[in-house]
Amino acid sequence: MPPVIAEVGLGHDGSLGLAHAYIDVIARCGADAVKFQTHIAAEESSVHETFRVEFSRQDRTRWDYWQRTAFTPEQWAGLKGHADDAGLLFLSSPFSVAAVDLLERLEIPAWKVASGEVNSLSMIERMAKTGRPLFVSTGMSDYEEIGRMVDLLRSLAPDRFLLMQCTTAYPSPPDAIGLNVIDELRRRFCCPVGLSDHSGTIYPALIAAARGAAVVEVHVTLSRDMFGPDVKASLTPDDLARLVEGLRWLRAMDKAPVDKDVAAAAMAPLRNLFGKGAMAIRDLEVGEVLSLADIHFRKPKFGLDERQVRALAGRRFRCAVAKGTFIKADDLA
């Protein structure tokens, strides 16, 4: 089953302590990786950038928001070290070449290209040069644009990329998840495909995993009462733990195919316990004909069941069978 990336994004709202708390919670829930976002306002934005959703009571523009919630290189290094100690892969989506350079110095294990960055070619080229895998979200792209991206990745990082089906809606309703796109991306581009989910539920990730998704990514919040634009699209710690448990079940089930014939043979004692046997409803004499009219079926299955009685109907009794006695094959001539 696929690894689970738990996306914090900017859920820490600029609090370093809260960012570290997320790492502890995500590790405790059993996810495989924690992912943040690395924004450097002067390298990616301008004072003209507006909010997608008005949510901040203290930031006039996105530029202000990026500046207020940014961490220093030393703070990023501390978060990476904490994740390493907690047994988590540390990931962060960069939004500028400068952010790639910062994260490269931390030797992060893979890159996540956000949906809005698929045409940031210089940044993607810089990522590819590191030799590390690239996970590319496709939330805002049509198939033509995805095709161009795949061509670029094949030239820069063959066999080191995967696509992520993603719906840029927070939260994503069921009819917008696009599980079918996972199959379609695999068919069109012959590469691994994962799901980056914003539904705020565990269901798309579980179903995507069962359909062969290479990785699943979900947003995480410490509480539904937290501040931030992604809270409604995020899982709580309890949700994340249930998702991980569900994926472990899927993994265990997938590794243990069942042979129905073998399983049925092992169930023979239970089949007799829960099945019904033929019981005489009157005294039956030697020479009488076996007939359903003289039988009712009662648990447990001693002797013949109904299917066997129907097959043997018309045979004669070679010994007497008392009322209330189960009828066996040996009772018949």
Image (cartoon, helix red, strand yellow):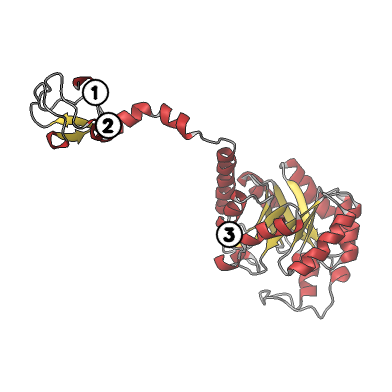
Task: Give the amino acid at mark 1.
Answer: Ala
Task: Give the amino acid at mark 3.
Answer: Ser
Q: Is residue 294 left or right of residue 219?
A: left
Q: Residue at x 81, y 60 (%)?
A: 150
105 in relation to 234, above or below: above
Task: Give the amino acid at mark 2.
Answer: Gln
Asked if marks 3 and 1 touch (Cβ < 8 Å), the reply is no
| Residue 68 appears in view | no
Q: Which residue is mark 3?
A: 223
Q: Which residue is mark 2?
A: 308
Q: Residue at x 84, y 76 (%)?
A: 46
**Picture quadrant where residue 156 is located:** bottom right
> Mark number for residue 4?
none
Asked if marks 3 and 2 touch (Cβ < 8 Å), the reply is no
Q: Residue at x 75, y 66 (%)?
A: 115
Q: Which residue is mark 1?
A: 329
**Which numbered mark, 3 or 2, is in the foreground of this view?**
2
Q: Quadrant of the N terminus?
A: top right
| Residue 294 appears in view | yes
